[in-house]
Image (tube, helix red, strand yellow):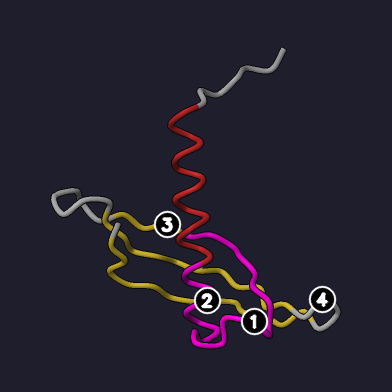
Amino acid sequence: MKILNAAVRRARRDRDFGRVEAEVTVLLRDTPHSPPRVETIRTSVPTKSPRSDLSLRERLIEDATSLVVLFNSTQRKKPLRTAA
């Protein structure tokens, strides 16, 4: 998977829990020949991180991308169940 572009919007700091919440839009491509797709997801990361080598923006994008991958893999494996 390759990230072509990413945008962080509506970021806000939650001082009580020491986290930053944001809406992250990622333009990504699964394979070199697949069409690019846009995914938007709301995510949060700690304000202070032991991974200090990444900026806050990079950590938000990384977390959003991993959530998109996780959601897509679980949707492929499980069909939707109908309500009883």
| Extreme residue in the top direction | 84
- Name the residue carrying label 2: 59
In the picture, measured across the screen, residue 45 lies left or right of residue 70, that is: right
* Badge 2 or badge 1: first in the primary sequence: 1
Asked if the magenta segment contains residue 61, the reply would be yes
Q: Determine the CA span between mark 3 and mark 4.
A: 26 Å
Image disc number at residue 49: 1
Which image quarter holds the C terminus? top right
Identity of the amino acid at label 3?
A: Glu
Q: Closer to us: mark 3 or mark 4?
A: 4
In the picture, measured across the screen, residue 38 lies left or right of residue 12, that is: left
- Name the residue carrying label 4: 17
Q: Residue at x 72, y 82 (%)?
A: 13
Label 4 neighbour load within 10 Å: few <14, some 14-19, many 20+: few
Question: Circle 3 sits in a helix, a strand or a loop, which is it?
Answer: strand
The quarter of the displayed image where residue 82 is located: top right
Question: Circle 4 sits in a helix, a strand or a loop, which is it?
Answer: loop
Q: Determine the CA span between mark 2 and mark 1.
A: 9 Å
Q: Closer to us: mark 1 or mark 3?
A: 1
Which image quarter holds the N terminus? bottom left
Q: Residue at x 16, y 54 (%)?
A: 32
